[in-house]
Image (tube, helix red, strand yellow):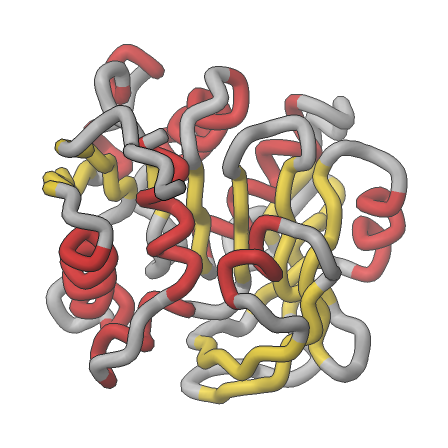
Amino acid sequence: MEHTPAKKTLRIALVGDFNPDVIAHQAIPLAIDDAAAVQELTADYDWIATTEVGSAEDLVGYDAIWVVPASPYKNAEGAFTAIRYARENSIPFLGTCGGFQHAIIEYARNVLGWRDAAHAETDSEGRMVIAPLSCSLVEKSDVIELRANTLIAKAYGRLSIEEGYHCNYGISQDFASELEEGALRVTGWDEEGEIRAVELITHPFFVGTLFQHERNALAGRPAPLVHAFLRAAAN
């Protein structure tokens, strides 16, 4: 028997600094519209610049939060506020590329107590949990192996996927070992074992990927994680 979603109209916050030249920003509305049409939902989304997020109050009322690519953000604190609000209030969360990187830093700072957790692209001091990749992934695609029985594996329905990237930074080796114990689990790796996806096992839907799966929409293909994100928001 098909489960009927509780909500038919969703409000989604897209947190990031919109730029029409960013490929991922062109793809995101298409990916959401496609997933909403398939699920017979209405998905209204608001682009919220990081400079517009002063406190969690600015995000109240949204059914889901997506911290989108194209960092450094104009106001990194705005991104961190959105991530923390989604994490602490069980609001479905998606972070891609810059959103993934900032979700890792937010978790390091506010859950693990690494107050000086930092991003090598923008910070000159602190513990670099986000560091330069050994090889740039700007406009590259790669095979990613997924952990079984996770949100991401269930979304794709398989354990090996190929997706595209546009980034130069990922999780540092020093920090990778910290993710073996806690609630934020690694759920996707590339063929060299580098971390490419994480999810929070204490949360109904909190997924971050270094790859930009939303780009599938530009080629007319579904973006499975966006489908899963909307389904979580509706239910």
Q: Position of residue 62 (x, y in %)?
A: 25, 25
Q: Which residue is the extreme one toward the top? A: 57
Residue name at image x 50 percent, y 58 percent = 155
**Residue drawn at 75 percent across, 83 percent down:** 191
Please, which residue is most extreme toward the front here? 1
Q: Nearer the viewer, residue 148 or 181?
A: 148
Left or right placement of residue 60 versus residue 189 in this view: left
Q: Is residue 5 left or right of residue 131?
A: left
Q: Quadrant of the C terminus?
A: top left
Picture layout, residue 25 above or below residue 77: below
Query: Seen in the image, is 202 located left or right of residue 122?
Result: right
Q: Is residue 89 above or below residue 91?
A: above
Regarding residue 64, the answer to whether it shows in the image is no
Q: Position of residue 192 (x, y in %)?
A: 79, 81
Residue 184: x and y in percent read 71, 39
Q: Where is residue 10 drawn, in percent x and y?
A: 19, 33
Q: Is residue 179 visible?
A: yes
Quadrant in the picture for the N terminus = top left
Image point (13%, 32%), residue name: 9
* Residue displayed at 75% across by 71% down: 194
- In this figure, what is the number of numbered marks? 0
